[in-house]
Image (cartoon, grey):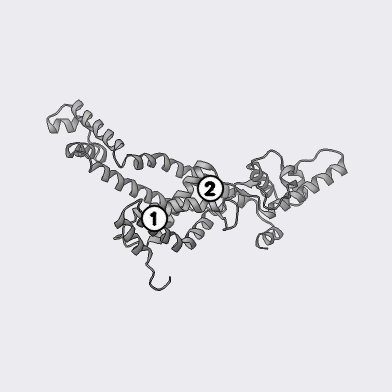
Amino acid sequence: MVAGSKTNEELIECLQAVGEDTTESKNILEKLWVQNKGLVRLTIHKLTGLSEFDDGFEDMRQQSFFGLRAAAYAYDLTSGVKFSTYAVKRIKWELTRYYERNGFTVRVPAYMKKRFRDCIEKKLELEAETNHPVTYATALEKMGFSPAVITGTLAAFRKLETTSIDKIISDEKEGDGVSLLDITAASDNVEEAVLSQEWLKELHNTLIAALRDIPPDAYKIIIQHYFHGVSLTKIAEGQGLSRQTLYNQETAAFQAIRMGKYGTVLAEFMPSHNSYKRAQRLIKQDREAIERLQLTGAERKLLIT
């Protein structure tokens, strides 16, 4: 860090003090973004396998900004946790939500294009020899690949947004737009648990803040009913009121929350959590599909040249 520049935590302290959507807050956010570009690049790469100049990376970077911004405003300066640690979790959360909403594709890697070019050549060669149609699976088998490799290769290509493998391979345009679901570095169960806990903590804090904005009587009803599992009938008996009266108070309180300043934030939580869980499954499936490809030594060399 340059001498005299503020730490992440110092910038966030200033940011939270000036509030949102001000000229000063925008300037602070810009400094925070520039200061954490390396962290963002690394986070994107670890989650998606993308590098800075790959197709799709810029979309991921833009989504990461939303995650960083949300992290900056939600970060608890007294938590004792470094902002960089907290921000990574929030950025990953934002990226998995984006993946779920939009899907995520990157271009077919060079080693795979070479494998299928070789496969097509083998297919044509076998058809010429036998005078009979030959499948891609048969061609891959004749090339010496194991059943697991053949299955993984064909499964991966079925995810391509096209119906013709030949068309994919024949498109030699530099930096072509051919795409393959190729998320190669998914989070494991521990990371998923951490993100889920982070989500639950944020939901809890937002919900409690929203409840504190409603009348005290309604607050007590909701806490007893939903947090402690006491039925409305029991609560009504204890307060000497009718069950319908309590139900009406509860309904009015929920309506006030939906219409209040926390309504929009709370509305995002339930669908986004379901989306997050589904996105994690999709990323895991894509990673497993890639692992089943079992790269040959020659193909591994293509990845690093």
Q: Residue at x 81, y 38 (%)?
A: 133
Examine the rendered structure and indicate whether residue 4 appears above or below residue 59.
Answer: below
Residue at which label 2 appears: 283
Residue at which label 1 appears: 26
Residue 294 position within the rendered picture, expressed as x and y whole percent measured from the top left: 65, 54
Q: Nearer the viewer, mark 2 or mark 1?
A: 1
Q: Is residue 170 left or right of residue 97?
A: right
- SS type, badge 1: helix
Q: Is residue 195 left or right of residue 247?
A: right
Going by the picture, which residue comes out furthest to the left?
240
Q: Residue at x 45, y 45 (%)?
A: 276
Distance CA(mark 2)–CA(mark 1): 33 Å
Judge the density around disc 1: few (<14), some (14-19), many (≥20) Cα neighbours within 10 Å. Answer: few
Residue 84 position within the rendered picture, expressed as x and y whole percent measured from the top left: 41, 61
The numbered mark, 2 or 1, whose residue comes first in the sequence reads 1
Label 2 sits on what residue type? Ile
Going by the picture, which residue comes out furthest to the front?
23
Q: Residue at x 30, y 56 (%)?
A: 18
Label 1 sits on what residue type? Lys
Q: Residue at x 73, y 42 (%)?
A: 167
State how many labels appear.
2
Examine the rendered structure and indicate whether residue 112 appears above or below residue 230.
Answer: below
Q: Quadrant location of residue 300? A: bottom right
Residue 120: which disc?
A: none
Q: Nearer the viewer, residue 6 or 54?
A: 6
Q: Nearer the viewer, residue 126 or 84?
A: 84
Judge the density around disc 2: few (<14), some (14-19), many (≥20) Cα neighbours within 10 Å. Answer: many
The reply to whether residue 111 is in sight is yes
Residue 126 position within the rendered picture, expressed as x and y whole percent measured from the top left: 83, 45
